[in-house]
Every structure is written in C-alpha cells, then in structure tokens.
Image (cartoon, rainbow, N blue to C red):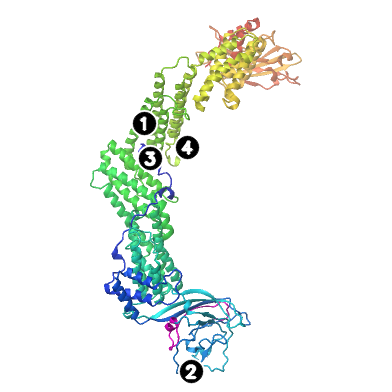
Amino acid sequence: MRLILKKGEGRQGLPCPEVLLRSSSPAPAEPVDPSRGLRTLSQEEVDMLYEEALYTVLHRAGTMGPDQVDDEEALLSYLQQVFGTGPEEHAVAVERVKKAKAPTYALKVSVMRAKNLLAKDPNGFSDPYCMLGILPASGAVREPSPHKEQRFSFRKGSKRGGPLPAKCIQVTEVKSSTLNPVWKEHFLLDHDDDVSLVEACRKLNEVIGLKGVSRYFKQIVKSARANGTAGPTEDHTDDFLGCLNIPVREVPVAGEDRWFKLEPRSSASRVQGDCQLILKLITTQRDTNMSQRGRSGFLSYLLLLNRLLQFEHRAEEPNSSSWRGELSGPAATVLCLHGAQSNLSALQLAVLHWQVSSRHHQTRTLDYGYLLGLLEDLQAHWEEAGSLPQEQEEGLADSFSAFSEFGLQLLRQLRDYFPATNSTAVYRLELLLKCLGKLQLFQPSFEICPFETELNMDIAAALKRGNREWFDKLLNTQSPREQPGPQRLAGLIKLADTIYEDLQSCYGIYASLFHSIIKVDFFTLTFRQLERLVAEEAWVLTEELSPKMTLEVALGLFELYLTLADIQRFWSSIPGRDSRSLALAGIHAPFLPAVKLWLQVLRDQTKWRLQGAVDVDTLEPMDASSKHSSSAATASLCFSHIQELWACLAWPDPAQAQTLGTQLSQDLCEAALFYTELLRKKVDAQPGAAGEAVSEPLCVVLNDVELLRKAAGQALRGLAWPEGAAGLEGTLPRPLLSCTQALDEDLQREARTVTAHLTSKMVGDVRKYVQHVSLSPDSIQNDEAVAPLLKYLDEKLALLNASLVKENLNRVLEALWELLLQAILQALGANRDVSADFYGRFHFTLEALVNFFHAEGQGLPLESLRDGSYKRLEEELRLHQCSTRECIEQYYLDKLKQRSMEHNRFGRLSVRCHYEAAEQRLAVEVLHAADLLPLDANGLSDPFVIVELGPPHLFPLVRSQRTQVKSRTLHPVYDELFYFSVPAEACRRRGACVLFTVMDHDWLSTNDFAGEAALGLGSVGGVARPQVGGSARASQPVTLHLRRPRAQVRSALRMLEGRPNKEAQEFVKRLRELEKYMEADP
C-alpha cells in the first residue's frame, strides 16, 4: 500500500517545468549521416577549388579590416593546411596562380538614400539626383584619345587629373520635391578604356579617389545623359547640393555600407546632409579553371565554405554539438575576399552559409542557435531583396527540404534525443523548433515550394508516428503479448506508469514549445494516441484475467487501475477537457472484482499492522514534541493511507462507489475499535505504580484514543462518494454519515471510560481533602481551610497538563469537577444540624474551585462549570443557610417555577381566582379538568380536587377544601366555588400560592395521586390592587398544567427533613402523607 501511495505522491495537480527539468548534463548525441552532406568533390575539382582560393588571396584589393588577416603568407599557409598539400606542391600551385592573368576589377556603388539636404527651391524642397564616376590620379598613364569629348569638373578649379569624360559619368534618377530622397540604384564604375581600374588600384598612392559621388543638381545634366552632345555654351548648370571625395584605397575588402557627410566644392559653398552608399571592389573576369569552365562565383563560394567549415569543425572536440560556426581569422578573411570579388549579395551570402551549415549539421552536429541565427539573417535579407536566380532558389529549397526531413526524423525520436528531464536537450529542441518555424515562414515566398504540405502537418504526422513507435517498443519490451496474463500484467503496470510520466513531460515541457513555436497541439495529439493504445491493452488483459482472479492478480489489477484513473484525472484537471470522450471511459467495470478483493486484503493488512504496532508499543510518548505513543501514529497513518487510496480510486460509478465506500468505511470503523480494544488490553496488563495518582500509561492511552478519533473521523469524511444528482454537494452520504457518527460516539465513550479510570485513582485523595474542609474548626479562615485541596489539585493538574493534549485535559477537568461536586455533596449529607458557617465555608470552597477550574478563561468555561451538579450543590448550600420558613417558601416557589417546564402529560385543570377586598376573602372556582391520567382498571378515574393555600405559616388558620368526586371520567366538570378568608397582605407574601391537588377516589383502598398545579396569588386579580366592579366569575379562567414534584422541589423537602424543629417536622410529615398516594415518577 505504501508503494502505491508513494507512486501517487507525484501525481497531484499539473506538473511544473521546474520539477521535471532535473538535469543539465549534455544532451544525447543526435544521429549523423555523412551521405546527407554536400557531395564529395573529385580530386580535379579539389585542385580547381584550391587554385580558386589561392587566386582570391593573391589578387586581393581593398583595405583589410582590423579583424582580418593582412599577411599574405599566413593566408596561403592556412589554405595549404585546409587542402592538405605538401610544401612543393603548394609552391608550384602558388607560382602557377601568380603567372595567371590578373582579374578585371570594378567598383560597385549602390546609392541608397540621402537625408537632411539643403532646400534650393522656393517650395522649401529640392529635386536631387546624383552624378558619380572615378577620377584617375594625375600621374596615371593615359593613352591619347582620338576623340575629344566634353568633360565635366566636379569641383571648381579642380586640376587633379583634369575633368572626366562624359561617358565615365553615371547619374541616378531625379527625386522630386524632397530633402530625403531614396534611390537604391546600383552602378559599376571603371576608368575609361585607356586606364583600367586595376592599374589605378596598383597605384593607390597616385589615385585621388572616387569624386563627385552625391553631387546633386536641380536638373539632369543633359550632356552627361546624352554622352556629351550638348554644346559648351549651353547653360545647364544646376544648383550644387554637395559632393564626396572617397579614395579607392579606403574601400574595405568586404565592402562598406555607411553614411557619408556631404562636402562643399569650395569654401563659398553652403551644403548640408548625409548620403548612404554601399561600396564594394569586385572582379568581372578571373583567370581560373573554375571561371573558365563556367562555374559561378556562387558555386565556388559554396564549395570553398564547405571545405573551410569541415576543416574548422574538425579542430573542435570530436563529439562537440555546441559549435556555433566560429571561423578562424584566416578562414573568415578568405571567405570575405572571395565573396566580395565574386560580387555576391548579402542575400546570396546568407543563403550560402545556411545551405552549407545546414548540410554540414546533418553530418556533424552544430548548435541550433547558430543555425537559427543563419535563418534569421537569411529572412532579414530575403525581405529586403526578395528574389534569387531560379537555380539558386532551387538549391535553397532543397536545403530546406533536407533540413526539415532531418528535423522530422529527430522529432519522431523526440524522447531519445530531447528527454524532458534534461534542460540542455530541451533547449536544443526549442531551437530546433524555432528553426523549423522559420522554414514555415519561407513557404509562401518561394516560386518553387520546397514542401508538398504545410510543415506543421508534417510535424504532427511525424510526432504521431514517433508516439506509435515508442509505444510499440515499450510494449514489446515490458509486456509482450506472447507472455502469460499474470506476467503481462506486471509489465503493463510499468508501461502505464511510463505513459503517465511521459504525459506529464508532454504537458509540462513539450506542449508549450510546440504550441507557441509551430502551433501544433502536441499534448492533445499525444494524450489521445497513447491513452487509446494503453486502453486497448488494458481491455484485452482484464478480459483474459477476470476468470482467473487470484489475490496476486487482484493486487496487480488494482495498481494498474489506479494508474489508468490517474491518466483520466490528469486529462480532466486541465481546464476545458472532458474525460467522457476518452477511450479509458468505462474502463473501471472489469476491474470491480479485483477492487473488492483488494479491499478485503486492505482490511486484513490494516489489522495486522495495528496488532504489530500495539505489540511493540511501550505506552510512552514518541518524543518530546508529541504526547501519543508509536502505535497511535501508525494507526493514524493507516487511516490516512486508506483515505488517500480511496481518493486515488475515485470510482466513477455512483452505485458501485456507494457499495465500495460503505464497506470500506465499515472496515475502517472495525479497525479503529479493534485498536482501542488492543490498547485496553495492553494497559490492563501493565502493573500500576503503588500510590500513583496520575498514571502516565493511562494518559498516553487517552491521547492515543483522541488522536485515533480525529484521524478516523478525517479518513471517514474523506471516503465520500458521488451520489449523483440527488446528492448535496459538501454533505456526506447518509450511510457514511451514520458510520462516522457511530464511530465518534464509540470513541468518545472509550475516552470517557479511560478518563473515569484515570480520575478514579484520585477519588480517595479528593474525599480526604474535602473532609479536611468539612472538619476545619470555625476559627480557621476559609482560604486556609481550602488551601490543601487547591494545592493538591494544582500539583495533579500540572502533571495532567504535561501529559495530556488539550481535548483530553478538558475531559479530565470535567470528570474531576464532577468528582469534587459529588464529594462536597456527600460531605453535606454526612453533616446534619451544623452551623450556618459550615455551609458558608463550603460555599466559599465552591466558588474557589470555580475560579480554579476556569483559570481566567484558560480552563473550563463558566457555563459548563455552573451547570448540572453545581446547580444542585449551590441550591443545597443556599437552602442550608435559610431558616425553616424560608425553606418552606422555597418549596412553594419551586412548585410555581415548575409550571412552565411541564407539558400536558398529566392533564389540565381550569380554574378562576379573585380576591374580594370588601370581604377580605379569596374566591377560588374549580371549573373543569381534561386529559387526566386513567388510574382505574377500567381506563378511567374518579377524580376530585383538593384546594389549599400555602405556605402554611402564611395561612395558619386556613383549612384545605375539596370538590365533589366525579365518577368514571377523565374530563370532569366541577364548577364549584370556594372561599378562603385571608388578608391581602398574606397573599402578597413571597411564595404565597393556591395549590390544586387532583386525586383519584378509591372506595376500597387509598386514593391515588393524579397530579398537582400551583397558582401564585400575586398574579390574582384584586390582590395587587382592589378590583373595580365585577366578581370572581367575571375574571378570566386560568388553565394549569398538572405535574408531579421534580427534583428541585424535593431538594427543599430534604433540607427540611434534616431540621429538628417542630415546624419543619410537621410540614414534612404532611407532605409524606401526600406522597403515599403518588406513584413513582415515570
């Protein structure tokens, strides 16, 4: 049972990622396949690629950046290592490349935009455009041109190299009415035919630079547009807005994208604003075998990047999966040179790096964060450029398809490569999903779509296939179908447990990733699939095992059902999910016989555990912080386990749940009473210490019973079952409520029994100290007389407080309080004809004990202290202090108080009373009676009424009167009027009343008492104040309920019995004669 509950401890509520992610160790290695990379090059192709790389290094142009390697020998040496060539072979290759024809260079200029230009038009704007060209150095070698051309000067008085020919000038479009024009136009600039750009680059010290870029005019220069056809005399001079002078030698190797501040052409020019340019030195002709064979720079770069990436990655740790593609300085420099010389755009470079890296990842694992960065870079440039040549787009689409296929293969084996308990693996999964999510964004952008269906549909299909493969593998490993049923059962339990844990991981870890990144509901998909598969296996196995039900099989089926029920509850605990549509709905039916058998085993195991716990119990507190023994802790744990198991069982069928719950609750009650019986036998078998007033074992047992009462009550309340639509929410089913109440009463009774046993050891001491109070002479002060008793109680209660829990301490206090009251009552009964001081001392003692037990609110409440026996004792003390006549008056007052407390059990009597002041007499009319007791054998009575006034000392000369006898009736009608001559002052005295006694007349024996009633004379008309007019018959009748004397009436009688004076004895004698006619109280 403990193992089953321990399994269920982790299944409370929905899982949180912090609990599931328990390891940060390296993620499992992903599968790699060398065949999934780029194709292997032939030796000839490798040689051509080597030549291409050397050619790129030896013919580099531009300025090297700070992060680039400017040492030519270092770059050549690096390439020798990459291609693995020997020194001689490398020297031959370098020499061959040096002899090759140098490439043809050009300067690619992209005029992007300008901002904050100067306004030249009256409307506050300008109509800007840009003219640009390359101005050679003054010392550059130039061949004479056979044609004279119109030339333009960008600066006033420019003498460096002379003006440019018109054919060398290129012009952007005119942007009307703006100070922030946007062009995004691209130009290739070179010298004219007689001076090539490469010659200018080789004489960087002589080249002045790129001049005239961003020279803005209000009108298009017609001669430039018409290649110099305009005459020199025509005035086509536009407003000057600014110019730039950019030396070619300052253009970086990788190109440059920046804002340039516009410059004036002379000191008198007024300009403002900035211009964004992209500059790059490229080659238009290359004397290499790859170029001669028509291999594009795009393909060359792809092959070179792949070669360098493989070389760089090999330098990392052999099993490293966290490499982020960090290239060394020489590698980055070579690629930068080749990309720039091949005029590859930023989009093409992003495509190439993605293609090569994604393919390389499938042969040797890279960091998904690096791949995601490549895709983000690609996306950014794609949105800006928007298209590629068809061949390059097809290659990109192929790389997408290959990577998505590789990713889907990993997702099929999600649990192997991305276990939910490994935070590193889960982070890799997140990055992989983000990569796949990026691929989805490219689907609508391709003219040639790389995916036949939506990628998220392919992911869902891969996950479903992976779930099925994982389940089949588990099933074949843990519960193969060819095994016998009992052996399969053990394996199926493990399988169900594994599925539950997997579903927790799906919900707590995987679900949010799949839903937020690629919009796939992975948890619902997986839960539905695995729940259906495990339900099918469970149905088949239970049908096979039901005819062969044994104890071992029942235990296994019970454990299996608990896991299946946990799976159902896990689904239902998610908001918006309904378990009625699951395949597991109704799975409980075949498990019912096994559950019934298991509950029987649970009952026997519980008793066995309780017996063992009591056997080893020493009836001592477990530790300093607890006051119960070890067996009570075991019993409490047993009942708690039963409640938890019932909660885990959660039987869905209301009728069957009621049967199971009722049986389980009865078993629990039986176990609780069995435990108390064991405790009783245990404590009875222990020898008691001589003279020990407070028994520690009894205190421990009392605490054990209280702990058991609470634990059993809580467990029983936890066994509530669904009652369907008729049941009220929050209330216990009736059978369970009855069982709970009955057990609580039994345990309360057991606690009272132990309490009585505990306080019985204090009876002798209590009586001794009470007797000390009664025997103390009058010369001793009251507080001195009661001090020994209070000291004794204080010592014993200190021990009890240290040994008992709060509830039991109150029980003992209540029992001890009753013991004290009875002891005082006995002391009063044993002392007759004593002084009033004697009773005053005990009254002082009683109040001192009340304050002691109340303890300023920390002990018993005053309401309970001043109830029951306390009232009787207080009344007796008060009466003992009264005179004989006061006691007699109290006797009649008690009769008057008794009237409102009775019902119609003894019948009713209607009377009418009035005091006639003129005659100084009291008129009493007996009208009729009803519902009298049948006191004769014939079921009727012969009633008559005795009317008398009391107390006798107030009316000494008044005799009682009686009505006629009405034969054979229970509803006699009298209508008889009686007069009593008494003064009004006597009628107003304390306790003055008319006493009506109804008797049954017997001819052959004594009369029988039927009942009595009293009417206070203070309320009679004419007594309080004279009656004005009318007569006794004019007053309203009064209905009195007949009754018999109660205990409080007889207490006054007992007080009078102890009085030796004549008045008391005569009153008692007359009452005793009346009691002879009374039957005992029913």
Q: Can you identify the residue that label 1 sits on?
A: 606
In front: label 1 or label 4: 1
Crowdedness near tag 4: few (<14), some (14–19) or many (≥20) residues, C-alpha within 10 Å? few
**Magenta region, residue range:** 175-202
Q: Residue 1058's x, y, as percent?
A: 60, 8
| C-alpha span from label 3 to label 1 | 17 Å
Q: Which residue is mark 2?
A: 148
Residue 6's disc is 3
1062 displayed left or right of 58: right
Under circle 1, the secondary element is helix
Question: How far apart in space, not on screen, are marks 4 and 2 (Cα)?
Answer: 111 Å
Mark 2 or mark 3: name the one nearer the start of the chain.
3
- Residue tagged by mark 4? 731
Q: Nearer the viewer, mark 1 or mark 2?
A: 2
Front tag of 3 and 1: 3
Q: Which of the two discs, 1 and 2, labels the residue nearer the N terminus?
A: 2
Q: Mark 4 vs mark 2: which is more N-terminal?
A: 2
Q: Nearer the viewer, mark 4 or mark 2?
A: 2
